[in-house]
Amino acid sequence: MATGFCGNCSRLLKEFTAHFRNVYREIEQQIREVFRELSQCTCFRTTPERIFLRRMTQEFPSLHLLYEDETQLLDQESLRGLNSLASSENTDLQMTAAMYYLHLSHHLKSPLPDAFMEPVMALLLSTDLNVQKTISLSLVNLLVKNNVCKELVIEMGMLVPILELFQSGDATGQCHSCACVTMLASSESNREAITTDGIIPLLALAKSYDPQVQQSATWALLHLTQSESSIRILCQAGAIPVLVLLLQSSDSEVQFYSCTALCNIAAVQEHHPKLLSIGGHFLLKSLLTLMSSPVQKNSNQACRCLETLSKNVLIQEQLMDLDCVLPLKALLKTSSPESAITLLSALSARPPNNDILVSEGLLDEIGQLLHHHRCSSVIITHSGKIITDLCSSCEGQQSSTLSDETLLHVTTHLHHLMTWDPLKSTLSVTITSDQVSRLVKLLGQTEYPQLSYNSAAIISKLEMTGKMAQLLRPHYITMLEYLLVFLKSKDVNFQQLGIVTILNLKKDEDFSSLLANSKLELQLWMVHVQTEETRRLLQKIEPLSPSSVNL
């Protein structure tokens, strides 16, 4: 059979395999000798420890493969041996039991029987720090794989020695105990027990100078922000200032965990005063800084946190004062602009913000965004809302306070964006009666022809659904007069746009009824006659080839 290897490679692989087998046999023999000597020592006599060690001597070489039938490792004989080792005053024997559990935690595929949790409790209470670290790591692994019941861990009182490990001063032990707390906190029924005694020591560890300890503690605090009751206790215990300071950590994971925790807290509006109580807008400034993080998930999470906070009007005012638009525009150019466009959508909903949004060139940025993300429903929906809000705000202001150039800028962009079907559908659904009224009003701005033209172009693209027709009906009579001006214009472009707009509005029978026998219908007939006469005269002229015309 062909192996796909050349002769030299085959030889090298065979030599390596043979060498590895020899090395493994030597290690295996050394391990057997250690356990054999231990099992023969008079310290054990005929005890469960000796029986257990003898089994380990016999079975150790195959433990890494584990039995297909795990009952051989979890039978009553093993349980008696583990109980004896765990309760022994000899720390070496305790470590043997802890290592056995560590091995089980890596390879066990079925739930650990409840009876096997008793030795775990005894090992957690060991006076030896290394035993505590080993068994706590085993417990983390078992919790991660759902091999043990989280509620049972709390019921057996294991939380106390786990929390005591916080005080060990050992970074590894502290990380393991934090991970245990994190996994236990994923159960809602456990959070009350954890928040009663665990928050203060967790907050202390979150201030650790060890980056791994800080990360583990912050991860645990994040899991305690999954319910309003635990959030309330966290805030009462002073978690907010700690989490805000962690936003400036040099560790990107710590930044993400603390930002996500603050986002969960911000979702409960009663905590907004505490979030804002830190002087100098420190929270908002920290989140705006994090928004510029090169780690994309952190910048996106900072946006989400600010979007949650932006439901508070005072926070919106402060954000605009802190020039939040510039970093948000930068995020629109990244590969994941969804969180930024969502926050901008929230800001545009408040009319006082829109002058700044327009002056910062947001419409240009949205146009580019839609050009590159035509298939994203989130981006299209929020872009449509922003454009509608900005147009509504601009159209609702007095001409003395808003330049014609700004109005023209907004309506030009909206006209261009309405040529994209997904956005046209979104705008047609989200537009309000007040916004329709303002659009019709701009249609009559005959002293500003281009502004009037843009408004007609937008109306000509609206999808004439039942809702849209209902919004337009109160304005049909006025629009008949405005469109009559379009048809009487000497500019062919205006005449053609007027006809296109009429065709769109005629999809509603109410408009068709008003159009019948009106001045607008008469003007349509006159345009038709003029067009036919022009066509007839052109036919009398000898046709010219396009190449002969000097354009």
Image: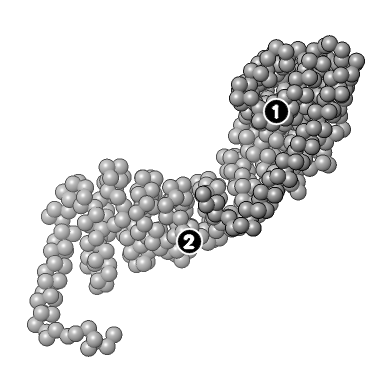
Q: Which residue is drawn at 27% across and 69% down?
A: 493
Residue 441 seen in this snapshot: no
Asked whether, in this view, residue 326 is left or right of residue 500, the answer is: right
Q: Residue furthest right?
A: 42
Element class at badge 2: helix
Asked whether, in this view, residue 61 is left or right of residue 395, the answer is: right
Relative to 2, residue 80 above or below: above
Measuring from the top left, give residue 269's x and y in whole percent. Answer: 61, 33
Q: Which residue is drawn at 37% across and 64% down?
A: 451
For the residue carrying disc 2, how many other residues have a C-alpha within 10 Å: few (<14), some (14-19), or many (20+)? few
The three-letter amino acid code for the residue at tag 2 is Gln
In the depicted view, which residue is nearer to us: 56 or 490? Answer: 56
Measuring from the top left, give residue 537's x and y in whole percent. Answer: 10, 79
Instruction: Give the residue number, with chain letter if any, for mark 1.
Output: 63
Element class at badge 1: helix
Q: Residue at x 66, y 50 (%)?
A: 13
Relative to 82, residue 372 above or below: below
The quadrant where residue 417 appears: bottom left
The quadrant where residue 239 appears: top right
Relative to 308, residue 55 above or below: above
Disc with the residue nearer the chain's start (2 vs 1): 1
In the depicted view, which residue is nearer to us: 320 or 155? Answer: 155
Measuring from the top left, give residue 336's x and y in whole percent. Answer: 54, 52
Position of the C terminus by quadrant: bottom left
Instruction: Give the residue number, with chain letter if any, for mark 2.
Output: 368
Relative to 286, residue 524 above or below: below
Asked whether, in this view, residue 342 is left or right of residue 431, the answer is: right
